Image: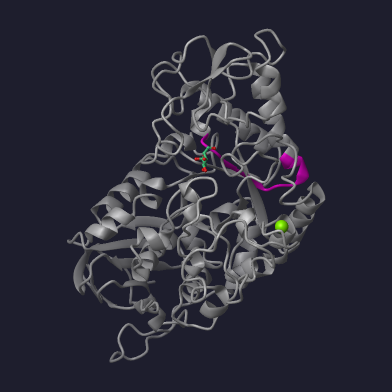
Amino acid sequence: MSRVAFALAACLALSGCSSSDSQPEPEPFPEKDWPAEAATLLEGSDWYRHAVFYEVYVRSFQDSDGDGIGDLKGLTSRLDYLKELGVDAIWLMPIMPTPFKDSGYDISDYEGINPDYGSMADFEALLAAAHQRKMRVIMDLVLNHTSDSHAWFSESRKDKTNPKADWYVWSDTPSAPNNGCGTANPTFGDSAWQLDPARGQYYFHRFYPEQPDLNYQSPAVVDATLGVARFWLDKGVDGFRCDVIGLLFESASECDLVPETRDYIKKLRKVLDEYPGRVMVAEPSKLTDASGYLGSGSDMFHMAFHFGYGYFWGLPFAAQNADGIVDTFEKSLATYPAGAQDALVIGSHDVQRAFTVAQGDDTKHQRAALIQLTAKGTPFVYYGEELALRPGKQEVVDQRDAARTPMLWDGSAGHGFSTGQPWIAFGGGADQYNLEAEQGDPESMYAFYRELFALRRGRAIWGTGAMEVLETGTPTVFALYRADDFMAYVAAVNMSDEAQVAELVRPELGARTSRVLGAGTLTLTSGGATLSLPAQAGAIFRVR
Ligand code: GLC
Ligand code: MG
């Protein structure tokens, strides 16, 4: 495997890299005390707009007891790693008790901890340790369905008259009232109805048959699930990532975000607002339009994942054409309500590793991450992407396991993950692409992520500054202009395998330029600037 050869690493210092070696070193731009700024931004109620979030699969992060399964104590022992990396908040994939038919997204007890991962005391210790380091913790809230082993379902399925008889969606026929909202997803099968012989009826399941959908037409279900949110908020969690939250209610004509679902989300938001500083981020089901989840900007979600970019960047990069990226950001800029915050990803536990999406081209992964980390919004980085973890081959639950293999901390046999047999085989290239190896390599993916995180740190402009998608005159070059009242940047990516020169059209782009990351030059002109990027390169220029 070749080493990461992305030109970004050519300019490691965060400020003062000159745009061309032949030019005299320009006067430095004014700076602030960035660590102090970071502390202030991350303490306020808008902390989530300035935080770097990191998604953790506890099962695969760090094992503490040698059983081969990552656990809460293990994660706690790695908080210093995350802090050092530049992570401000972690999102925990489900950690509740589960029969594990959907990797924990099938919950059998909303108020417990999966014994594989530890105890409630371990969770409380994790939360305290994170807060002590001024890091936040949000958790997955999976409200559309439970496990079929949940006590609620055991009761509901008994007969048609028990107190929880209407807590799930039951029907005499495997069809309406939510025709059309069934599964058409190869992961979950093709029928959304399952016959329950005991009750003599079919129940609706949008996902695996072991994940019956809760019936939100029942007010008791609304109360019980809002109670689940309160339970964890009372424990001190900083918020939630809400799983497939658009699917709570189905109607005959529509499945996603019907008016009753919006009303529920507003109720959930009101519960959160009783607790200062808590936030929630939506997993939108409409992959190319998250705006519906953001309501007025203050009555539904604080953030929603931008899958229009995050789950589709592989296509424009493969085509060496930025049009699709331009479109999705133009759309979010035009449709998101004022006050809403974009949540930017390039992947998650549900899709392939960035390494795979990038077809093994680390420069593509880095260029995609450069857009994720410089566009207006809050980045959510999936664990291991900072090392460019390679996919695994073993399947324990389903094919998504390829992107859920253990974290690679070092080059030893257990890779620092576990002293026992890991629950799933390590991903590819584990001897070469692990933290220990990459820490010693200034051109590694790890070095790249650290550099970008450091460039974000304390600079409010990334989370909340204005954003414009610049006209570049060519689909091979994507460029953003970011500005607030203190500073301005141009972030640019060459989509193509060949060097590109683009004319950026925008009067008053800046006063002078200084490249702070990457490779290439930016020369200001009266109508904008001339941007020159080497093949497969990205760059960030400060222009004010
Ligand atoms: C979400 C989760 C996914 C899970 C599904 C059902 O899409 O991200 O992993 O399988 O919901 O809970
Ligand atoms: Mg363990």
* Quadrant in which residue 216 is drawn: top right
| Residue 310 visible, this orientation | yes
Residue 251: % across, % down: 45, 18
Q: Residue at x 45, y 60 (%)?
A: 391
Judging depth in this view, the residue of 298 and 130 nearest the camera is 130
Q: What residue range appears in magenta?
A: 232-244
Residue 17: % across, % down: 40, 84
496 on left or right of 434: left
| Residue 527 visible, this orientation | no
Q: Residue furthest left?
A: 473
| Count of residue discs | 0
Residue 123: % across, % down: 76, 51
Q: Residue at x 66, y 29 (%)?
A: 225
- Quarter of the picture containing the C terminus is bottom left
121 on left or right of 360: right
Q: Residue at x 68, y 15 (%)?
A: 158
217 on left or right of 329: right
Q: Is residue 304 above or below residue 164?
A: below
Judging depth in this view, the residue of 538 and 195 nearest the camera is 195
Q: Is the image coloured rainbow, by chain, by secondary structure, or in one colour?
A: one colour
Q: Is residue 507 magenta?
A: no
98 on left or right of 354: right
- Quarter of the picture containing the N terminus is bottom left
Residue 444: % across, % down: 46, 77
